Image (cartoon, rainbow, N blue to C red):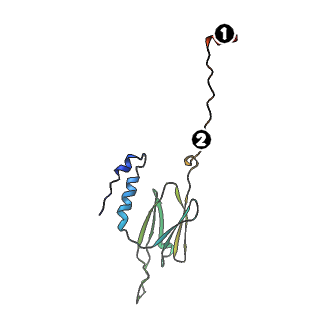
């Protein structure tokens, strides 16, 4: 396995303590399973959607949890006991998918439609964290008092 040295990156960043753990988790999950397949769409400026193919799973078989900026989608299908398959091509095995969410990304809701689980996300940046313009004003010149000028003015 290939390892990366990110120490030059840390010299020029301040306050990115989670960066190392994020990069480590990405390199660690390089060999992660590919079931079930999913898409990530950008619907607008701050709206996103994760669509996951969950054919054969009912709403009760799926669980969605958000904890500390990690979205976890898991599924465990209840098997029918009296089924005698001649061929079973539709995968119904249990799964768990984790998605690292950026700061201020919240889950709006989830829908199950035509075998696809849609999880809608929105990024809501608080007003105090949005960039703002600072106006620059010219400083008024300060008047200097000279002794001779003050006496002459009186």
Give the residue number, with chain letter if any, for mark 2.
Answer: 134
Query: Is residue 1 found left or right of 37 in the rendered image?
Result: left
Task: Decide: is 136 above or below 100.
Answer: above
Question: Residue at horizontal 47%, vertical 73%?
Answer: 61
What secondary structure is marked by label 2? loop
Query: Is residue 79 found left or right of 154 in the rendered image?
Result: left
Give the residue number, with chain letter if any, for mark 1.
Answer: 151
Q: How crowded is mark 2: few (under 14 residues within 10 Å), some or many (20 or more)?
A: few
Question: Residue at horizontal 47%, vertical 59%?
Answer: 101
Q: Earlier in the sequence, mark 2 or mark 1?
A: 2
The x and y percentages for residue 8 are 35, 49
Q: Which of marks 2 and 1 is in front?
A: 1
Q: Quadrant of residue 93?
A: bottom left
The x and y percentages for residue 62 are 48, 71
Could you tell me which quadrant the N terminus lies in?
A: bottom left
Residue most extreme to the right: 154
Q: Quadrant of residue 14?
A: top left
Q: How far apart are marks 2 and 1 (CA)?
A: 42 Å
């Amino acid at each position: 396995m290939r390892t990366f040295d990110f120490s030059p990156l840390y010299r020029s960043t301040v306050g990115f303590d989670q960066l190392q753990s994020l990069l480590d988790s990405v390199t660690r999950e390089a060999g992660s399973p590919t079931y079930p397949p999913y898409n990530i769409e950008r619907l607008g400026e701050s709206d996103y959607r994760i669509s996951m193919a969950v054919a054969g799973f009912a709403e009760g078989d799926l669980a969605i949890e958000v904890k500390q900026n990690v979205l976890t989608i898991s599924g465990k299908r209840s098997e029918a006991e009296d089924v005698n398959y001649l061929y079973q091509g539709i995968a119904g095995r249990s799964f768990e998918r984790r998605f690292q969410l950026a700061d201020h990304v919240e889950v709006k809701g989830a829908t199950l439609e035509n075998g696809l689980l849609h999880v809608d996300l929105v990024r809501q940046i608080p007003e105090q964290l949005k960039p703002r313009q600072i106006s620059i004003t010219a400083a008024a010149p300060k008047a200097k008092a000279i002794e001779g000028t003050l006496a002459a003015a009186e």
